Image (tube, rainbow, N blue to C red):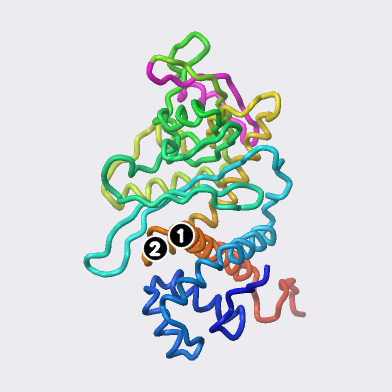
Amino acid sequence: MQATNYMRGFSSAEVLLRTILLHIGRGYSLKETASRARVAKLAEVSSVALFKRLKKSEEWLRGLCLALLEESGVEIGRWNTVRRFRVVDGSIVKEPGKTGSQWRFLFSLRLPDLECDQFDLTPTKGKGSGEHLSRLRIESGDHILGDRAYAGTEGVVHVLKHGGEVLVRSNGVTLPTYDQEGRPINLLNRLSKITEAGVIKEWSVSIRYEGKDYPGRFCVLRKSEPQIQRALKKLKRESSKDSSEVKAQTLQYAKFVMVFTTFSPKQFSSQDIMECYRLRWQIELAIKRLKSIVELGHIPKGDDKSCRAWLYGKLFLGLLTEKLLRIGSVFSPWGYYLETQQMR
C-alpha cells in the first residue's frame, strides 16, 4: 500500500515512516519527534502537521502489517469473511517522565483484513478499567478469539448474551466448567488421563453465571515434551523472581493447551478449534513484541484514527522484530549452511 495524499513535508514514504516510528517506536512526544526529524534533516514539519500525518497513515500502516503477516506465513486470508472473527488483546502503557500517566488500552483486530474495530483507552484503576471481554462492543455473529487473560465467566457470558461466540484459552482456574449433570468438572483428573502428545481431546461442558448454565466445549491438546519442559522452566524462572512456589496444579496445566469455546460443533471440529487458536497465537507473537515495545510512549487520547494508527505502528514494529529474528536465526556471512567435511 502506497503512502499517498499525506506526503507534504516529507521527501519519500521511507522518510515519513522513519519519522512516524521515532514517535511510535521510541516513545518521543510529537513535539520532540518533529525537533529530532528537523535536526536529522529528515523533514521540516511541526508537531501539529506530524499529528495530521499520523492520523492519515492508519490504512497505510495497516497494509504494511498485513504484508508482514502474510510474509511470515500466517494464512489469515483463508478465513470466511461472512463470520466476524475478532482477535482481542490489550496492555498497559506508561508515558515518559516521573509523573507519566499509566493507561490501559484494549483493542480488537478483525480478521482477515486486520481492521481495528475497537480501541478503548482507560485509566489503569477504577470501574471498567480491567482487561476483560465485558468491555467489548459485540454484534450478533461475532467470533471472539482471546488468550488466558479473557478466560473469565462474566466476560464470556457478556459476549454470549449479545449474540457472539467465544474461543478463549483456559488457565484452568478462572473459568470453572460443569458436566451435563451440573457437577463441577475435576479438570486435573481428566488431564491425568491424557498422556499422548498431539491428540485433541474434547468434552461437552457448561459455564455458570448468576444461576444460569451456558453450554460449550472444552478442547485439550497435550504439548510435546520439549514444549512442556520449556513451559515448566519458564514457570519456575518466574516464580524464583518473586520467591513464590509454583502450585502443583499450575505445573500440570502448563503441559497442555486448553481451550473453551462456544463455536458451533457443526461448523468447527475440535481440530478447527485448535487451528483457530493457532492463528490467534501466531498473531499474538507480534502482539507480545508490541507489548514489549509499548511500555513507553505518548499514546493519542481522544481521536480514534490517531489511536488506531498508533496501534498499527506498534504492531508493525512487533512484526518487523519477528522478521529480523527469523532472518537472524539463519544468517551467516557466507549465506548458506555449512556441510561438515573431514580434511584428509
Instruction: Provide the secondary structure element on which disc 1 rests.
Output: helix
Which quarter of the rendering shows the N terminus?
bottom right
Type of amino acid at the residue the image marks with label 2: Ile
Front-lying residue, 309 or 226: 309
Which quarter of the rendering shows the C terminus?
bottom right
| Residue 7 in view of the camera | yes
Above or below, comparing residue 270 to residue 92 in the picture: above
Segment colored magenta: 187-210
Q: Which mark sits nearer the N-terminus, 1 or 2?
A: 2
Please give the residue where the numbered disc 2 appears in the rendered image: 299
Please give the residue where the numbered disc 1 appears in the rendered image: 307
Q: Assess whether mark 2 and mark 1 are in contact (beta carbons under 8 angstroms).
A: yes
The numbered disc on residue 182 is none
Type of amino acid at the residue the image marks with label 1: Cys
Instruction: Give the percent coordinates (x, y) of residue 67.
Output: 67, 62
Q: Is residue 143 left or right of residue 76?
A: left
Q: Give the residue drawn at x 63%, y 65%.
A: 64
Above or below, comparing residue 42 to residue 119 in the picture: below
Instruction: Give the percent coordinates (x, y) of residue 240.
Output: 31, 50
Q: Is residue 340 magenta?
A: no
State how far apart marks 1 and 2 are (Cα).
Answer: 7 Å
Q: Is residue 222 left or right of residue 36?
A: right
